[in-house]
Amino acid sequence: MRKPLAAATAALILFGGAQLPASAAAAAPTDLQVGWADAATGKFKITWQDSGEANRVKIEYEDSDPAVWLALPQAGEPNEYLGQGARLRRNMIARIIVVSLDENNAESAPASSPWFDTNLPGVAEIQRADVLATGAIQLTWYREPALQDTTPNDPLDQPSTNEHVVPAIHPKSGTIESFPAPAGVKTATVPPRPRPYSVIVRTQNEWGFVIADRDSTVQVTTLTATLGMPAIGQYLSTVKFSAEIGSPECYGVNCGYGPVYLQARADATKPWATIGKYNAEPPKFSAAIGVYGGRQYRLYVPAWSYYSSDIRVAPALYTAPRYSAAQAKFSVVGFNTTTAKVGQLIKATVNVLPAGSVKADLQWSDGKVWRHAAYIGLTKGKGTLSFKASGRGTTRSWRVVVPKMSMKGLPILATTSRTFKLAVR
């Protein structure tokens, strides 16, 4: 007798179900460990235990989007993942999640690490930059407070000694140089380097580094200065010099160069002495100085700092020495008359500064050359000479030449007076 169709179908279902049991879900990983492989370089390591399944490694950020995949190790591969801390989202609270996958990629129950922070250190903002006599740059900065650690003693916490403040030199071309300092310091000196270059200060820890959002950069440049000085001046008169200060970063702009100093010396064997202080605003200026003898001059421009959107600094500089000679100054020179009869007594008078005791040379011109007539002895810069007029019917040009001399160690050139005439009837 035939069995009913429904009964036969039910028997097949029961038989088939007994032969093909449902697959078991993958077991959750165990012994999940999170730690630093190399904290100095920000490299962390994740390890776990399982039964050889494929895995999915994720990171979950607190109060944020769903977990993000970090890796997908295949079955039989090592149960570990090496990651770079700088590639994680910083200043967050996070944890690592690892699941195993069955043959259908269904996830097992998760294994989770403790929550940990990825906090960067507080930013350092440069407050001041000073150029030292050596050309080194001394930096002073302010540290903003770091974020509060809400996961103390988490598995990725590092000692405070792993945090640094790092001044770094960025040349226009070439290699960046860094000078790490302990986190607690607030000042550092970076050595002199060929200018121009920039300096930044970054703070860094195992999670990476941070630089101030606003401009907190020091531009280290070179000032330029020129000094124009007359080649010669007259004793106890004044000469006018010109000067100009500048820097490539402030072309055509008043960058507040502040006071500059004019210095002088007799010669290269003597020390420089400051003889004038001038305001270099505007950067191109002129001024008058007294003449006391031949001297070398130079302009001294102190180390410069200018605070704008960034900080600009330059070391002190001196212009090349410029020599300005000095001539004597005749206050009185000439005869007591411009016309005379033959045999008439003529009186020559000379008053000259500086008031040296020298012999002045009285000369006359024959129309081609100047000829010596007589010496006039000067005592303290003054002297007279009397002689009888000769050469009826002549009108001659005369002059006086005083020899070189010195006053208070400063040289005075041999100096020729103005010409004056004498007609003899």
Image (cartoon, rainbow, N blue to C red):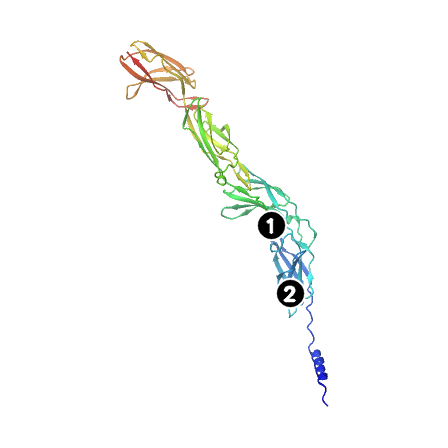
Is disc 2 placed on a helix, strand or loop?
strand
Question: Which disc is residue 55 wearing?
Answer: 2
Q: Quadrant of residue 345?
A: top left
Give the quadrant of the C terminus.
top left
42 or 236: which is nearer to us?
A: 236
Is 97 left or right of 227, judged from the image as shown? right
Is disc 1 placed on a helix, strand or loop?
strand
Question: Which disc is residue 209 wearing?
Answer: 1
Residue beneath the point at 66% across and 50% down? 159
Q: Position of residue 327 (x, y in %)?
A: 40, 23
Q: How many numbered tags mark residues here?
A: 2
Give the quadrant of the N terminus.
bottom right
Q: Tag 1: residue type? A: Phe
Is 353 left or right of 159, judged from the image as shown? left
Q: Tag 2: residue type? A: Asn
Q: Quadrant of residue 200?
A: top right
Q: Quadrant of residue 59?
A: bottom right
Q: In the displayed orientation, state which residue is furthest to the top.
A: 344
